[in-house]
Image (cartoon, helix red, strand yellow):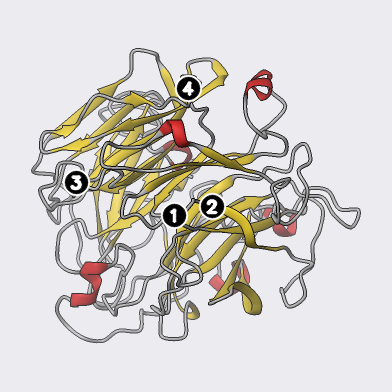
């Protein structure tokens, strides 16, 4: 969903300043870069297993409300383990600045190997950060460095330029190599309407040697989400954004910026077979859903009840749009849609369901096609309002389909906990292969759980898809953090 100092390197586990307790170290004791980490963007300790970062930007840290923290669970041969965890805040030794009220550390979370040492690094947005140069709420993006014992130390990567720029607000941050030089670049939204590209490689002090590019759209857009991936198969990452026109919230669209050796090319607004703009949404992710070698665009539009519903396919209750990639970029004329009234999709489309919330794309069942997870946080059932759920749609040669789709909620047999009104289970979702078996597990956030304390659920995967068997949940009690109004699970490291 969405930050000037030097770097302090520490070989030991960081201290969890949220409560003063010692954070458990990552389960890897070797020295030097681990080759497996080069293949993963989310392996912080280089043991060959993907790790999970969970944001709580509204959490209280050392008495500072909405200072925020990010919790990390490390992967292993048996998947994510709550026994191997870290909690990182701005009060963690070596991390830039200190926890302050309304900083919102964790407003955006992503991960990649920024310094090319073989370990993935945690990149965190701090949208409410003040700076001496810019003033109030300029915002900050900072890195916490990965290493053989997990995350430690950090550095600022970029501050906002002006007062209330709120750099990285609402999760609007993504990482990728947009100029094909082999180094990861930072792409972040500044002041809600312009893209700022900070080009790597990055030094340990957070400095970038590739310069910056500012992309401004004349239509005065307001960005809703960002993602990077190779949509045209040329080996250079592209950027895709969803946004609306200025104050016209209902005038949403999807824009594609092709990555080139010189950086991002001019944006292209995607159009459908009617030559109308493909309407955007609040969430998107990229992945090869149809297995043709090109990353596809998947957009979630969880809202309904607007004038544009009249011109938009199956908007009721929210929907997911699939836009295939190709050698010429995304093909808007072949866009297809799925909602809860589509054949075999669990549930039924109802106003306010929020189907399409927080899209994530990865192969869940190991069949070679990327699948799609989406939340349904407004789902009502058993007399409960906004109890919520989550759905995984299977990928295939024709794109996503309802066939074989699976849904879960807190009333599903085998799922820990109990469904309650306003839990908002499914407000966020994430797919991560934490045991490296070729099948991504489903992670679901419920920021409304326990009166907005928030909790996270993890679901195993099989060749038949996700299963409630062996699922588990964790919250503030497991992490040793302050529960009240933390809204744990507000975002993941997409």
Q: Is residue 69 visible?
A: no
> What numbered label is drawn on residue 46?
none
Q: Which mark is residue 277?
A: 4
Q: Residues within 10 Å of mark 3 (few under 14, many from 20)?
A: some
- Nearest to the observer: residue 186 or residue 436: 436
Q: Secondary structure at mark 2?
A: loop
Q: Position of residue 286 (x, y in %)?
A: 40, 48
Please tell me whether residue 341 is drawn above or below residue 43 in the rendered image.
above
How far apart, in angstroms, are the residues tagged by discs 3 and 2? 24 Å
Q: In percent of the image, x 38 and y 54: which residue is there?
A: 288
Q: Earlier in the sequence, mark 1 or mark 4?
A: 4
> Within the image, what quadrant is residue 468 found in?
bottom right
Residue, disc 2: 400
Residue 72 horizontal side relative to residue 180, left or right: right
Q: What element does badge 4 sit on?
A: loop
Q: Earlier in the sequence, mark 1 or mark 3?
A: 3
Q: In the rendered structure, are the residues bearing label 1 and label 2 in contact, judged by CB atoms less than 8 Å apart?
A: yes
> Disc 3 on helix, strand or loop?
loop
């Amino acid at each position: 969903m969405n930050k000037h100092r030097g770097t302090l390197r520490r070989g030991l586990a960081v201290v969890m300043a949220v409560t003063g307790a010692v954070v458990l170290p990552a389960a890897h004791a070797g020295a030097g870069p681990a080759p497996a980490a080069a293949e993963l963007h989310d392996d912080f300790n280089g043991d060959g297993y993907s790790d999970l970062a969970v944001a709580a930007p509204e959490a209280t840290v050392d008495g500072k409300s909405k200072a925020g923290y990010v919790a990390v669970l490390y992967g292993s041969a048996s998947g994510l383990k709550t026994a191997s965890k870290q909690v990182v805040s701005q009060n963690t030794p070596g991390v830039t600045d200190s926890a302050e009220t309304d900083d919102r550390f964790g407003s955006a979370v992503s991960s990649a190997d920024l310094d090319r040492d073989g370990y993935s690094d945690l990149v965190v947005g701090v949208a409410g950060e003040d700076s001496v140069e810019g003033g109030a709420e300029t915002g900050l993006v900072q890195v916490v460095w990965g290493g053989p014992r997990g995350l430690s130390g950090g550095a600022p990567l970029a501050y906002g330029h002006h007062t209330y720029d709120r750099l990285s607000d609402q999760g609007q941050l993504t990482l990728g190599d947009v100029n094909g030089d082999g180094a990861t670049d930072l792409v972040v939204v500044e002041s809600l309407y312009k893209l700022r590209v900070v080009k790597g490689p990055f030094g340990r002090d957070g400095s970038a040697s590739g310069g910056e590019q500012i992309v401004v759209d004349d239509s005065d857009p307001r960005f809703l989400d960002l993602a990077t991936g190779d949509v045209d198969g040329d080996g250079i990452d592209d950027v895709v954004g969803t946004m609306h026109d200025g104050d016209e919230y209902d005038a949403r669209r999807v824009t594609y910026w092709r990555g080139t050796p010189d950086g991002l090319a001019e944006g292209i607004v995607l159009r459908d077979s009617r030559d109308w703009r493909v309407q955007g949404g609040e969430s998107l992710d990229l992945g090869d859903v149809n297995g043709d070698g090109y990353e596809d665009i998947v957009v979630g539009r969880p809202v309904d009840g607007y004038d544009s519903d009249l011109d938009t396919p199956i908007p009721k209750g929210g929907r997911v749009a699939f836009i295939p990639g190709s050698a010429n970029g995304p093909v808007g004329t072949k866009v297809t849609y799925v909602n809860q009234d589509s054949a075999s999709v669990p549930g039924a489309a109802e106003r306010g369901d929020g189907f399409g919330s927080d899209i994530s794309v990865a192969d869940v069942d190991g069949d070679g096609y990327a699948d799609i997870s989406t939340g349904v946080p407004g789902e009502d059932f058993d007399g409960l309002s906004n109890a919520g759920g989550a759905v995984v749609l299977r990928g295939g040669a024709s794109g996503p389909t309802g066939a074989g789709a699976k849904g879960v909620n807190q009333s599903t047999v085998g799922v820990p906990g109990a469904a309650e009104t306003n839990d908002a289970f499914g407000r966020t979702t994430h797919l991560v292969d934490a045991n490296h078996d070729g099948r991504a597990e489903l992670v679901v956030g419920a920021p409304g759980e326990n009166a907005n304390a928030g909790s996270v659920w993890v679901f195993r995967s099989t060749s038949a898809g996700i299963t409630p068997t062996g699922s588990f949940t964790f919250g503030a009690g497991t992490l040793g953090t302050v529960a009240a109004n933390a809204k744990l699970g507000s975002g993941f490291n997409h």
